[in-house]
Image: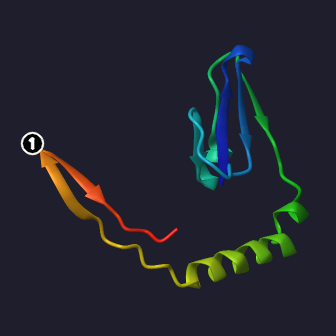
Amino acid sequence: MATLTYVYADQTAVLGPLATYAEPHCYDLCAHHSQRMTAPVGWEVVRLEPDPEALKPSSDDLEALADAVREAARPREAVPAPVEVGRRGHLRVLRTDVDA
């Protein structure tokens, strides 16, 4: 799998490792389509091959996963339900009693 990015000013199509977050004008391709991808006439295709060692999970990845699991398992504080104290047409005034 690869992420395809276009650099219109340079007439270049760049195929690299999967992006970690979504960006406009970037497209994720399956392995089949990334290998067969061609660019318009006059454009250059740059294929960035990642270092295989860099793709392996690191201890930082494991720690981040453990922290995410701990955070998800942490009990949430109960938030008091808001109380309607007034109304004007379709608008409501709500009050939430929160101890500071």
At a point 63% along the width and 38% down the height, the residue shown is 37
Tally of marks: 1
**65 or 81, which is in the foreground?**
81
Q: Is residue 99 above or below residue 6?
A: below
Residue 68 sits in which quadrant?
Answer: bottom right
Q: Is residue 58 visible?
A: no
Q: How is the image coloured?
A: rainbow
Please state if 80 lies on the left or on the right of 72 as rendered: left
At a point 58% along the width and 41% down the height, the residue shown is 27
What residue type is disc 1 on? Gly
Horizontal and vertical percent position of residue 44:
75, 24
Horizontal and vertical percent position of residue 17:
74, 50
At a point 63% along the width and 49% down the height, the residue shown is 21
**71 or 30, which is in the foreground?**
71
Q: Quadrant of the N terminus?
A: bottom right
Please state if 51 lies on the left or on the right of 15 as rendered: right
Q: Which residue is mark 1?
A: 89
At a point 83% along the width and 70% down the height, the residue shown is 60
Horizontal and vertical percent position of residue 24:
56, 34
Residue 31 sits in which quadrant?
Answer: bottom right
* Disc 1 crowd, CA 10 A, few/some/many (<14, 14-19, 20+): few
Q: Is residue 63 visible?
A: yes
Residue 26 sits in which quadrant?
Answer: top right
Please state if 90 lies on the left or on the right of 51 as rendered: left
